Image (tube, rainbow, N blue to C red):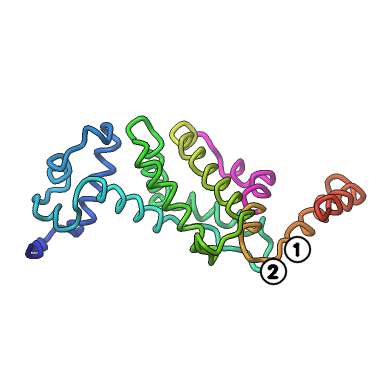
Amino acid sequence: MPRPRRDSEILPAKERLENAFWTLLADRPFGKITVTDVVHEARVNRNSFYYHFSGLPELADSAIMVEIERLPLPPVPDSHDDPLVVWHTFCSSMVASPENIQRIDHLALLTSDHSTRDLVESLRDFMRLTLLSLLDETPSSINNTKRVLLDFAVGGILSLLSHWPSMRHTVTLREVQNRDVAVLAMGLYVSMSRQDTDGFWERLYLDSAHLGGKDSAIAGLEAYRV
């Protein structure tokens, strides 16, 4: 099949098709979306659709992967970083970008009533692969402990996405940067990485000495080490 001619539209056909997928998924269940709907919404012809995709499932996978790849993730802290500071910086930069908020809106649609089990599984698989890549791991190299942590993290992200429509206009940056949230998020993140986690937990418990007393902080650290 010859390559479709690119017209003078601002966005290339593939990107318009992916955008059309999200627009239509917000409007109706995936099972009621047709190729005709997509090409009309994207303003491309059917040849353009079938040049890029074999069908709607492949379009959906492509659209999901693009959003996940473009959504920034916090960097894995090295031994000199404070994971809590990394989390605060990441959250601030995330909410400052309307494009990032829109990407979260899109991914949240995959947990809505308009989605399907296959779309949720695609989202889950792509998130797992993205995190594995970020952590410099592969499905075959990751050990059982990290596999459990990874599944826990992905499950948590899916849960957050399902609540996102009711949270997006009420949640505040201060709530997201809450210490408990930061400890949970970055503690899990650091534990999945190949970084030495002792430094993170030592800083956390020693810092807690200013809040709950040095003795309780040391006791907590010793309990963690055991």
Earlier residue among tags 2 and 1: 2
Q: Tell me which secondary structure the magenta stretch mostly adopts.
A: helix
Q: At 12% across and 48% down in the image, what residue appears?
A: 43
Side of 157 where 60 appears, left or right: left
101 over 203 or under it: above or below: above
Query: What distance separates the C-alpha of mark 2 from that of mark 1?
Result: 7 Å
Q: Quadrant of the N terminus?
A: bottom left
Q: What is the crowding at mark 1: few (fewer than 14 residues within 10 Å), some, or many (at least 20)?
A: some
- Where residue 50 appears, as percent x and y from the top left, is 14, 53
Side of 110 where 39 appears, left or right: left
Q: Secondary structure at mark 1?
A: helix
- Magenta stretch bounds: 170-186
Q: Secondary structure at mark 2?
A: loop
Mark 2: amino acid: Ser
Task: Tell me where residue 193 sits by quadrant.
Answer: bottom right
Q: At 64% across and 58% down in the image, what residue appears?
A: 190
Instruction: Specify whether residue 17 is painted magenta.
Output: no
- Where residue 76 appears, as percent x and y from the top left, is 59, 63
Mark 1: amino acid: Gly
37 over 224 or under it: above or below: above
Name the one closer to the observer, 157 or 97: 157
- Where residue 54 appears, as percent x and y from the top left, is 19, 52
Q: At 9% across and 50% down in the image, what residue appears?
A: 46
Label 2 sits on residue: 79
Label 1 sits on residue: 199
Do tag 2 and tag 1 residues touch (Cβ < 8 Å)? yes
**Can you tell which mark lies on residue 147?**
none
Q: What is the crowding at mark 2: few (fewer than 14 residues within 10 Å), some, or many (at least 20)?
A: few
Instruction: Specify whether residue 182 is painted magenta.
Output: yes
